[in-house]
Image: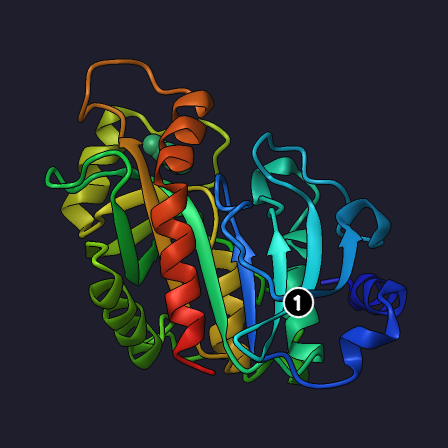
Amino acid sequence: MNWEIFNKAADSLPEVFWESPVDCGLILGSGWGSVLTCDEVIASVKYDRIPGLGQTSVVGHAGELRLYLRHGLRIAAFMGRRHYYEGAGMEPVVMPVELLRRMSGRRLLVTNASGGINPKFKAGDLMVITDHLNTVGINPLIGPVNPNWGVRFPDLSHVYNPELSAILREAAAEIGVSLWDGVYAFTAGPVFETPAEVRAYAGMGADAVGMSTVPECTLAAAIGIPTAGLSCIANPAAGIQSEALNHQEVLDATQKATPRMATLVDAFLRRFA
Ligand code: HPA
């Protein structure tokens, strides 16, 4: 991991980012870019102005870091994410977590869109990520030990903090949104899975599959930032339906679910006010 990249990124941000601890960080994946309700925007920086982060190349990802107030809380929202499959290494992928660590972030909510493996899941359903399968075999902690990032062999028994997950469920119940629990399988992408892979992941215990989230949440767990994960099931995974998959379908499904996603994120945040 190239530490200099993180230093340069942090140096590029306005002073106001470092003035007091951030109550919650948000990493907003495909289709989640427009879920924010802000009382006051403190600062807004485009990703391409942050060295080492760079513009996300994925349609549907806004590419903006916003510091704002909501319910009296200070929130840092990474609107859009970088993916490992973009080929720029792990630094841009986990940069939001490292910046949040430097902002003394108290907690983190990570969102994504995924393919549903569990046959009960329908497009547009929302799922609390209770655990994950890393099918990729790489993670951001490979390399020399960095004392800022915890110990050599971090425990991953609770990557997705049980208390925060419970708060997500309570918030959903309060606003009448239904939420599944499920295990998220991380693949490198950018290819969608083969039907045989989807069958294999189902056998391994996965409920949904996607190309993100696990690197960031692995690092947050190692650092000790309590983290919750929320996935919008965008489509039945390959082989579960007969039609070919495409990214537009993912964007359409998440767009339809946006009002529910926005109310849920807001009800979640309100619980920390
Ligand atoms: N597979 C992987 N990633 C995804 C999918 C999928 O079916 N849908 C949305 N992101």
The reply to whether the residue tagged 1 has its Cβ within 8 angstroms of ligand 1 is no
Relative height, residue 35 to residue 173 (above, below) = above
Return the residue nearer the eye: 136 or 45. 45
- Please report the residue visible at 61 percent of the width from the left and 51 percent of the height from the top: 79
Q: Is residue 84 above or below residue 158?
A: above
Q: Is residue 36 left or right of residue 15?
A: left
Residue marked by disc 1: 68
Where is residue 176, by image quadrant? bottom left
Give the left or right position of residue 1, taking residue 163 as reference.
right
Q: Position of residue 10 (x, y in %)?
A: 82, 68
151 relative position to 193: left or right: right
Return the residue nearer the eye: 204 or 113: 113
Instruction: From the top left corner, tell me how far across and down residue 145 is, in percent.
Output: 64, 78
Badge 1 crowding class, 10 Å Cα cut-off, few under 14, some 14 to 19, many 20 or more, is many
Q: Amino acid at mark 1?
A: Tyr
Q: Residue 265 location in percent, x, y?
A: 42, 61
Q: Position of residue 159 (x, y in %)?
A: 38, 72
182 left or right of 167?
left
Q: Is residue 209 visible?
A: yes
Secondary structure under tag 1 reads: strand
Q: Is residue 134 visible?
A: no
For the point 47% across and 75% down, the residue is 221
Q: Quadrant of the N terminus?
A: bottom right
